[in-house]
Image (cartoon, rainbow, N blue to C red):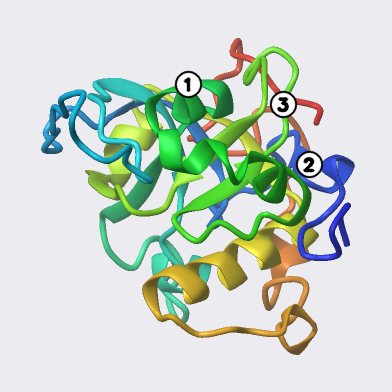
Amino acid sequence: MGPGAHRPYDEQYWTRPWSTAVFAGDLFEGVPFGEQPTVIYTADDMPPRHFLGEIAFGHGLLITPTCDMTEQRKGGIAHPYRTLVPVLPLELVLTETGALDESANLLRSRDAVGPYMYLPPLPAVLDEEAVACLFRPALVSDELLADPPRRVAQLQPEARRHLKVKLAAYWGRVAVDPTELPLTERGEEELRADGWPPSRYDDPAGPAANG
């Protein structure tokens, strides 16, 4: 696992898009988050733990379960709805959330701060450390992610499994032992593409992250 034995090593997070279908943990660019409510705090308020600032468009991490997006019997997509959470620079979040600043080292080492998932830098895509804001999901269509193609990276198996653990802890308030979860999805290798772009979600001329 990672530095605190509770998250993967940095090199176990990102990889170049490789699959013909989308997976939970895929990273997309240009995702709209603009309809979310925001709150303005005054100097007399307690510093918030959750990032409450406006997010118009940005990178988004797909959290819809992989098995729920694919039609198991006939192939193709099972439904057109995709849930993503915004990915923000860690320093921005720390600046805007005074209460979280005290837990910065815990977030970096163990990824043990419930509302967030730590994400290491990704060359040419995420220039610095980032976090996925698990508490601010947005719903978009599958077509929006494909036209124009918006996928820029995918999580490797260890990080994908870690995402499942984080989602269970935040949304279900359940502590899951990652070793009890399969490392890969059923039939995953059958979705590996032979060339570039691997899917309609990937831009032939766009940034193809190498991790």
Q: Which mark is residue 121?
A: 3
Q: Which mark is residue 194?
A: 2
Q: Residue 91: x, y in percent?
A: 56, 22
In the displayed structure, would residue 125 be above or below residue 36?
above
Q: Is residue 73 above or below residue 158?
A: below
Front tag of 2 and 3: 3
Quarter occupied by residue 53: top left
Q: Which of pointers 1 and 2 indicates the residue nearer the eye?
A: 1
Query: The residue under label 1 is which amino acid type?
Result: Leu
Name the amino acid, label 3. Answer: Pro
Q: Position of residue 59 (x, y in %)?
A: 45, 28
Hey, what amino acid is under mark 2?
A: Asp
Q: Secondary structure at mark 2?
A: loop
Where is mark 1, residue-wise? 92
In the drawing, does residue 127 fall left or right of residue 36? right
Q: For mark 3, does the 10 Å Cα neighbourhood hold few (<14), some (14 to 19), or many (20 or more) residues?
A: some
Along the viewing direction, whichever of 205 and 15 lies nearer the viewer: 15
Number of numbered discs on residues: 3
Residue at mark 1 to residue at mark 2: CA–CA distance: 39 Å
Q: Give me the residue at 63% from left, 84% from top.
A: 176
Q: Is residue 210 visible?
A: yes
Q: How far is the residue under mark 2 from the one under mark 3?
A: 27 Å
- The residue located at (49%, 67%) in the rendering is 167
Mark 2 / mark 3, whichever is N-terminal: 3
Say which residue appears at 33% left-offset and 68% top-offset. 78
Left/right placement of residue 115 relative to residue 199 reads left
